[in-house]
Amino acid sequence: MFRLRHMSKVAILSLALLGLIPCLALAQTPPIPAVDGSAGLEGTISVTPIQGGPTRKGEPDSKPLANITFEVKQNGQVTKSFQTDDRGQFHVELEPGHYTIARKDRKGVVGFYGPFEAEVAQGKMTKVEWKCDSGIR
């Protein structure tokens, strides 16, 4: 009986100490810096071709992909989304890491709108120029 009572006190004390370990680790971990606008992606997304048939001399073959929403994924999870402006330009702040970017809501949309791969470095806005394929032939 004494042995059993002693074991349960040891077990309870052990569990209590284990419960404190995460608190101690949290107190010693430095805070993760917030995104301060110095890292991410910026650039232009365009679409080509914009008309069927061969390219016509003197006429543009591409145009900005205006007002389209894209999703930013990391490890298969959506982390952010952004929308291009009227000129197909965008700016999105991200933590350093590897990302996959593709058009949101692609159901029923003809063409290729990603995924595009991008690497974001600490303290750097990575500039990109992506071309989407409209699927027009």
Image (spheres, rainbow, N blue to C red):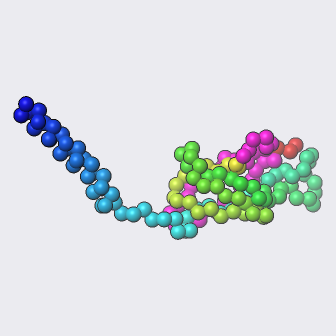
Instruction: State the residue at coordinates (79%, 43%).
Output: 109
Instruction: State the residue at coordinates (78%, 57%).
Output: 65
Left or right: where 116 falls relative to 24? right
Please tell me whether residue 22 is drawn above or below residue 6 in the rendered image. below
Instruction: State the residue at coordinates (79%, 64%).
Output: 86
Please tell me whether residue 90 is drawn above or below residue 8 in the rendered image. below
Percent coordinates x, y for residue 9 in the rendering? 14, 41
Quadrant position of the N terminus in the picture:
top left
Q: Give residue 111's quadrant in the image.
A: top right
Q: Name the residue furthest top.
A: 1
Instruction: State the residue at coordinates (71%, 49%).
Output: 103
Where does the magenta region start and end?
105-134
Depth check: give the residue in front, 77 or 43: 77
Total tally of numbered discs in the picture: 0
Please tell me whether residue 118 is drawn above or below residue 5 in the rendered image. below
Percent coordinates x, y for residue 17 in the rendering? 21, 49
